[in-house]
Image: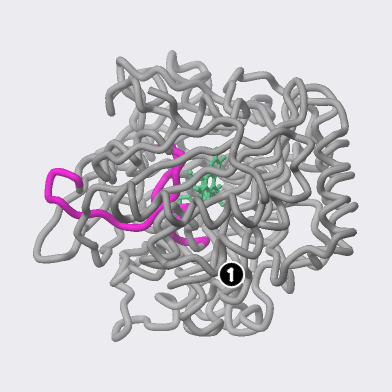
Amino acid sequence: MLDRREFLRVSALTGVAVSTGAAAAMPFAATVAGAAAPDWRALARGLDGTLIRPGDAAYDRARLVFNSAFDKIRPAAVAYPKNATDVAECLAFARRFNVPVTARSGGHSYAGWSTGTGLVVDVSRMSGVTYKSGRATVGAGARLVDVYAKLAAHGVSIPAGSCPTVGVAGLTLGGGIGVVSRKYGLTCDTLASLQVVTADGKLLTCSPTQHADLYWASRGGGGGNFGVATSFTFRTHPTQNVTVFFLHWPWARAAKVISAWQSWAPKAPDALWSNLHLNHDPSPDVMVGGLYLGSQAGCERLLQALADKVGASPSSRFVSHTTYQHAMMIMAGCSTISVDQCHRGGDLPGQTASGRLVRDGFNAKSHMAYGPLSAAGINALIAQTAIPGSHSILLDALGGAVSRVRSDATAFPHRQAIFSVQYYAHRAGALQWVRAAHNAMRPHFGDHAYVNYIDPELTDWRAQYYGPNAARLAKVKAAYDPKRLFRLPQSI
Ligand SMILES: Cc1cc2nc3c(=O)[nH]c(=O)nc-3n(C[C@H](O)[C@H](O)[C@H](O)COP(=O)(O)OP(=O)(O)OC[C@H]3O[C@@H](n4cnc5c(N)ncnc54)[C@H](O)[C@@H]3O)c2cc1C
């Protein structure tokens, strides 16, 4: 069975560390001068969960995040709280001893901003998924592969991302673009309520009627800003069999494919989601992949409309009607392994003994495209892809349900963007290529960016991530974290 990973060839997941320039800068200083020495033993004793410190056998595994570019960062401790009380205990400790604190869920922050040299509060132990009457309650440390699999048992799902080991917390707090977003919205659009431990140690339930401003900010304002989320309650949708597809054209057709795709994908029926991959590894390649919430025949009709626009049939194609759950495994690159195996291997929370997935070393940047590319923009995209190296440009279609939510209804402002754009590179020269591609495409895409593709090198990041929502986010920050316990290099 073909799957997304094989098609992309971007997911070799080699674990190769690469130079990240500014991105590698440690976000936190270890402790603040003049504060009393932190009593780590007392913290460990006070937790129902566990605390891992330098010297412990698990430390050199517990400190690692998904991107191996940040392997040199050594936290003072990694806590795995068992419940919200443990989280509050960790925050009280951070306040008392002036220890920098950062939350971690799946550890996929592009900038490595779920680690640091202080206390990492990893919520992976809080990963339960329960379902009742159209609502799913998901622990903040759940990985997407487990969310999909556990909800599949009830015949329901939520719109979420495709990477199996991304954490539900980081994804939801920043928005959450996924393969059924055009039909069901962003992950944050289906969030009915969440529980957050705020800087003062209180556990708040946030919903349209309780702490509504924090609920608003938690839907697109980005992780690590307002508190440590411990659980999310989502409205679910029933699942059905779906059609998955991957189409290749010869590289010589790339301009036609880009032009056709950008007028087809954002305006397709909501049931059809697709993305365009421009890959170079070892030679340039163009591919359209996606998912249709319907029959194979219905999907084939829509794909024919794309081929007609391109003016040529694909040179290779894979179209398959399958269960919703299997489609998510295909999109995850896990179609030939079990859910258990579709994890990082290990015995730490969030890992499984049979896990086969490994970490990655990469650099990435992004744009949000608010309009189609001109002919000059298409040529620029092709020229950037054609540069020798190991890199990809990924365009994910938006529109549909995402665009029917007002730009200020949640903190995620990019409702009228027609697709997102990611520049993603591995190996030596990755950062240089990513920077050059981002710069070359700026005149064509503008400066909008998605906070979940967080980028330490953006200079006007407040406007780029949040647009007109930045001012309201600053008010929420001042209300819930007035002393700025939660600090990132790009904190609201
Ligand atoms: C391989 C890969 C594939 C991806 N695919 C998609 C995709 O399909 N769609 C999409 O929209 N995005 C995608 N992303 C981006 C992803 O959504 C973000 O990187 C997201 O922030 C990751 O969440 P995490 O919990 O795994 O990461 P983490 O690094 O753990 O957290 C990210 C940020 O949120 C904070 N945070 C973590 N847990 C909590 C918590 N409990 N409470 C408060 N703050 C918290 C962290 O401090 C950090 O600042 C992908 C990223 C990667 C690396």
* Residue nearest the observer in this picture, 211 or 390: 390
Q: From which residue to which does the magenta span run?
A: 152-174
Look at the picture and state if 111 lies above or below 359. below
Looking at the image, residue 170 sits to the left or right of residue 160; the answer is right
Q: How many marks?
A: 1
Question: Helix or strand or loop: what does disc 1 sit on?
Answer: loop
Q: Which residue is at a point 31% across and 15% down the rendered structure image? A: 354
Residue 155 is inside the magenta segment: yes
Residue 401 appears in the rendering: yes
Look at the picture and state if 6 lies above or below 77. above
Look at the picture and state if 273 lies above or below 276. below
Residue 237 is inside the magenta segment: no
Q: Which residue is at a point 39% across and 57% down the rendered structure image? A: 180
Name which quarter of the figure residue 342 lies in: top left
Give the residue at mark 1: 483
Q: Position of residue 54 (x, y in %)?
A: 53, 22
Q: Position of residue 440 (x, y in %)?
A: 90, 52
Looking at the image, residue 47 sits to the left or right of residue 459; the answer is left
* Residue nearest the observer in this picture, 38 or 212: 212
Q: Residues within 10 Å of mark 1 (few under 14, many from 20)?
A: few
Q: Position of residue 129 (x, y in %)?
A: 21, 48
State the quadrant of the C terminus.
bottom right
Looking at the image, residue 96 sits to the left or right of residue 153; the answer is right
* Residue nearest the observer in this picture, 235 or 335: 335
Name which quarter of the figure residue 117 lies in: top right
Q: Position of residue 293 (x, y in %)?
A: 33, 55
